[in-house]
Image: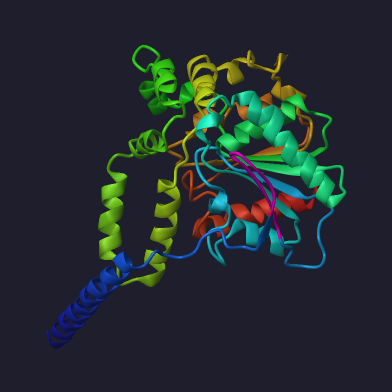
Amino acid sequence: MATAGFDLIDTARVEFERAMQRNLRGLEYFQTSGPSLGATPKDVLIERGTMRLYHYHPRVDDVYRVPILLVMATTNRGYIFDMVPGQSLVEYLLDAGFDIFMLDWDAPRADERSLTLESYVLDFVPAAVARVKAETGEGEVSVIGYCFGGVLSLLWAALHPDDGLANLVTFTTPVDFSKMEMFQRWADCRFFDVDKLVDTLGNCPADYLYTAFDMLRPGARAAGNIRLYDNLWNDEFVKSYRMFDRWSSDSLPLAGEYFRETTKKLMWDNQLHEGTLELGGRRVDLAAITAPFLHVAAEHDHIVPTAASAPLIGMIGSADKDEIVLKGGHVSLVAGGNAVRRLWPSLVAWLGERST
């Protein structure tokens, strides 16, 4: 009985101390802006409208011959690849000896509403690849695309099979848009007038996209706030929460014509999966991609379900191709503690064998 009494006292003491820490940390939380993200030193090589190309400073002397170009999705900013020291994929790849570039995006200006899918696939990505080659003096580049950045990378690779692609890696990249069931319901052509939205607003607002992603799990934000309150005493939890919350809410608007085109051609007509997509008067055939290929899917991805990316490996023409399905979600696959242990070592091992 005496031991049980001491246990209750110890439990009460711990809970009291945590409650005090919650109050103190809560005041600090609202008075500070959180950790600085995307701080790995880099140079800006291209800054043209919505397009940004970065080159990160090397961290080791012995560097692989083949450089890497990271291609970010057009809906979010690229610092998901470069959160904070110790939780930065960019830093991890640099330490492993890779020369890292990133194709990132800024909010499209009002006068960029006319940008199309061709603008990204036939202009922005090729311009980034050409600059990487010029900077490094190498004729080959490995490309890693995340989410819709993976789609852009696939389209570029299929239409430029002789443009020096050494390796292609995609993370959580959809090809069968009919399997993105929640987005299909919201973008149903019987009810969603994409022409009216674009003709009225020009660019698709960031708030529209943020709300669409948020509604995939409508209770997640409230649950997250509860977990935050319960863990305000825990500095590491708060740091991680702030990093991912800031990134997920830092959505970008999309150029109007680009949004109209991707909605109609990909979401409605599923042209990439059906093999009928044409860009610049040329049909996109993923079988034309013959460079070594790796796709990584997240087992619990609520944004790009595994069914939406499952056909990809069979559509690629490469003889050297692999698919990995890892535990985690759309974001935790590429960033955070689980990514450090699961994806990042596998990625370095796969690329290291193919980058000399």
Magenta residues, start to end: 44-56
- Check if residue 89 falls in the magenta segment: no
- Residue 160 falls left or right of residue 192: right
Residue 15 can be seen, yes or no: yes
Horizontal and vertical percent position of residue 130: 79, 40
- Check if residue 53 falls in the magenta segment: yes
The colour scheme is: rainbow
Image label count: 0
Could you tell me which residue is drawn at 50 percent across and 17 percent down? 264
Could you tell me which residue is drawn at 49 percent across and 41 percent down? 299
Horizontal and vertical percent position of residue 229: 26, 62
- Magenta segment, prevailing SS (helix, strand or loop): strand
Could you tell me which residue is drawn at 73 percent across and 26 percent down? 158
Q: Is residue 146 above or below residue 20?
A: above
Q: Which residue extends farthest bottom?
A: 2
- Residue 60 falls left or right of residue 276: right
Horizontal and vertical percent position of residue 233: 30, 72
- Residue 170 falls left or right of residue 18: right
Could you tell me which residue is drawn at 79 percent across and 35 percent down? 291
Horizontal and vertical percent position of residue 289: 75, 28
